[in-house]
Amino acid sequence: MDTIDLRILDLARDILLTTLALAGPVLLCGLVVGVLVSLFQALTSIQEQTMALVPKMMAVMTVTLVLLAPALQLLRDFTTRIISQMVEFGLS
C-alpha cells in the first residue's frame, strides 16, 4: 500500500475511535438504565411509558454533563491533530 493510503486508514481509525470515545459512555449508560427499568417494569407489571423514558433521559443528561469537559478536550485534541495533518494531505 502507498503511504497516502496508510495515512487515510489511520485518519479513518482515529475518527472512529474518537466517535466511540465520545458516544460510548452515553450510549452505555442509556442501555444499562433502560435494561434496569425494563426489568423493574417486568417484575412489577407496571407499564407506564413515562417510567421508561424519564430515568433514561435523566441518566443520559447527567452522564453527558459530567463528561462534557473531557469530551471537549478530546475534540480539541482531535481537531488539532487533523489540522496538523492537513499539510500532509496537501490541503493547506
Image (tube, helix red, strand yellow):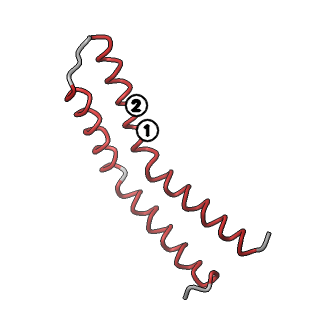
In the image, residue 75 above or below residue 65: below
| Direction from residue 12 to residue 73 in the image, left or right | left
Which residue is at a point 23% across and 15% down the rendered structure image?
46
Per the rendering, the mark at residue 32 is: 2
Per the rendering, the mark at residue 78 is: none
C-alpha span from label 1 to label 2: 6 Å
Q: Are marks 1 and 2 in contact (CB under 8 Å)?
A: yes
Assign a secondary structure to mark 2: helix
Determine which quarter of the picture holds residue 45.
top left
Is the residue marked by circle 2 packed among few (<14), some (14-19), or many (20+) residues within 10 Å? few
Q: Position of residue 70 (x, y in %)?
A: 41, 57
| Direction from residue 15 to residue 49 in the image, left or right | left
| Direction from residue 22 to residue 62 in the image, left or right | left
Which residue is at a point 22% across and 27% down the rendered structure image?
49
Q: Position of residue 73 (x, y in %)?
A: 43, 63
In the image, residue 57 above or below residue 82: above
User: What kind of residue is marked 1?
Assistant: Leu
Residue lying at the far right in this picture: please name it: 1
Which residue is at a point 56% across and 85% down the rendered structure image?
91
Q: Position of residue 68 (x, y in %)?
A: 34, 55
Residue in front for this viewpoint, 39 or 1 = 1
In the image, residue 31 above or below residue 24: above
Which residue is at a point 50% across and 74% down the rendered structure image?
80
Q: Position of residue 71 (x, y in %)?
A: 41, 57
Residue position for label 1: 28
Query: Which image quadrant: the C terminus?
Result: bottom right
Assign a secondary structure to mark 1: helix
Is the residue marked by circle 1 packed among few (<14), some (14-19), or many (20+) residues within 10 Å? few
User: What kind of residue is marked 2?
Assistant: Val
Query: Which image quadrant: the N terminus?
Result: bottom right
| Direction from residue 12 to residue 20 in the image, left or right | left
